[in-house]
Image (cartoon, rainbow, N blue to C red):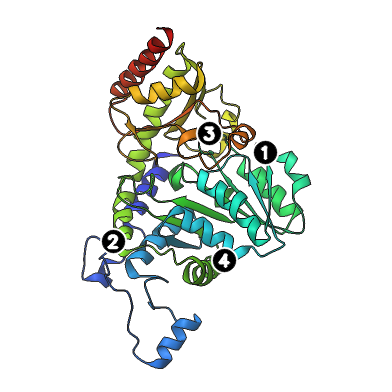
Amino acid sequence: MNASALEDFSTRAIHGAYDRAGHQGALNPPIYWSSTFAFDSAAQGAARFSGEAAGMIYTRVTNPTVQTLEARLAELEGAEAGLAFGSGMGAIASLVWTLLRPGDELLVDLTLYGCTHALANHVLPQFGIAVRTADFTRPETLAEQLGDRTRLVLFETPANPNMRVIDIEAVAALAHRLSPALVAVDSTYCTPYLQQPLALGADVVVHSLTKYINGHGDVIAGALLGREVLVQQIRMQGLKELTGACLSPMDAFLVLRGLKTLALRMDRHCQSAQRIAERLAAHPAVAQVHYPGLDSHPQHAICRRQMRQPGGMLSFELKDGLEAGIRFIDALRLFTRAVSLGDAESLAQHPASMTHSTYTPEERIAHQIAEGLIRLSIGLEDADALWEDLDRALAAGAARLTT
């Protein structure tokens, strides 16, 4: 992406979809603390409920502060419309419950965030929805899984937590050719700054705004972006009637604040992650590093083609497995032992016992999540200080194992 395009992204992330003249000249979008909104007449109320007239109804449906966030995200993602939620899982659940009916089929990738995996594999089958799984890193294998009853294809790229990268364009083209399915991409790891799935053929983009887009570890929020007709269907069914997973005006304001520095933060996250991944790959205690920016990553070429930078997330496996992983986690001092990601603080977690504990041990093996896998969210601290902490923890773990 050239310099002028990057500057344009930052400009739109700060100024997009907001007219100060309509809000008393306020520099920042005001927080509209109101659960409901008045109508001038019964006719106006009826027109808003029917969708014939624009305007506010009730904050569970939308709110002026939330609406600004939705419009700004849509602009950054290249979407016709956006819809904000109280969490990333609220976005995914609202999408699923709006589109799928008993007898329909959902096709998902091998690796999913733990709660998405639980919804797909442990909840939806109870309601007569068939869930199929495939290795999306090999798009040619999807053909036998796609059919007339496939209504939704859902995947993450890069995938959480093993950093598998999926060719969005190839999967979308195949799904649209062989089924009536919509293609939804969870692009939380990338944000619109690093990757734009809609431009590659996807129908829907989902984000956990909790992560990089907010970036400060103080909000739970989600978003869904796509075509206007689809987004409004999900708004009036999935959000309004099926989940009620609405975003508060205050949290929308905080996400808008975070958006202003998104490009700057992502550049720093990515630069530090690359340096740390290279050092981990050379460490004698490390068996394998999963980071798309390394030449050794199996989908490195796809990363270079569809992502502007390789991201701020990485994972790695220690040679001595599960016990070494736990000892390593416990030896960290600067990295915070916590789930989530995309904060200013660097975070470390053990997926098998934390975010992906909803998988059975057998499922983790089948879905390529090693028991000793460590996931790192590289924050905004000094990269050398982060490496000193990791190096010390690796040495401490190895020393314990040899005593």
User: Label 3 amino acid?
Assistant: Met
Q: Badge 4: how crowded within 10 Å, few (<14), some, or many (20+)?
A: some
Q: Marks 2 and 4, Cα distance to the nearest angstrom? A: 26 Å
Sequence-first tag of 2 and 4: 4
Where residue 398 appears, as percent x and y from the top left, is: 41, 12
The answer to whether marks 2 and 3 mark residues whose Cβ atoms lie closer than 8 Å is: no
- Label drawn at residue 250: 2
**Residue positioned 56% across, 43% down in the render:** 112
- Label drawn at residue 163: 3
Q: In this view, does 143 lie to the left or right of 249?
A: right
Q: Marks 4 and 1, Cα distance to the nearest angstrom? A: 27 Å
- Residue 347 position (above or below residue 127): above
User: Label 1 amino acid?
Assistant: Asp
Taking depth in this image into account, of 332 and 276 the one nearest to the observer is 332
The answer to whether marks 4 and 3 mark residues whose Cβ atoms lie closer than 8 Å is: no
User: Label 4 amino acid?
Assistant: Leu
Sequence-first tag of 3 and 1: 1
- Residue 366 position (above or below residue 115): above
Sequence-first tag of 1 and 2: 1
Tell me if residue 310 can be seen: no
Taking depth in this image into account, of 203 and 403 the one nearest to the observer is 403
Where residue 270 appears, as percent x and y from the top left, is: 40, 32
Q: Element type at marker 4?
A: helix
User: Label 2 amino acid?
Assistant: Met
State the residue position of label 4. Answer: 230
Q: Badge 1: how crowded within 10 Å, few (<14), some, or many (20+)?
A: some
Q: In this view, does 354 lie to the left or right of 385?
A: right
- Label drawn at residue 135: 1
The answer to whether marks 1 and 2 mark residues whose Cβ atoms lie closer than 8 Å is: no
Q: Element type at marker 3?
A: loop
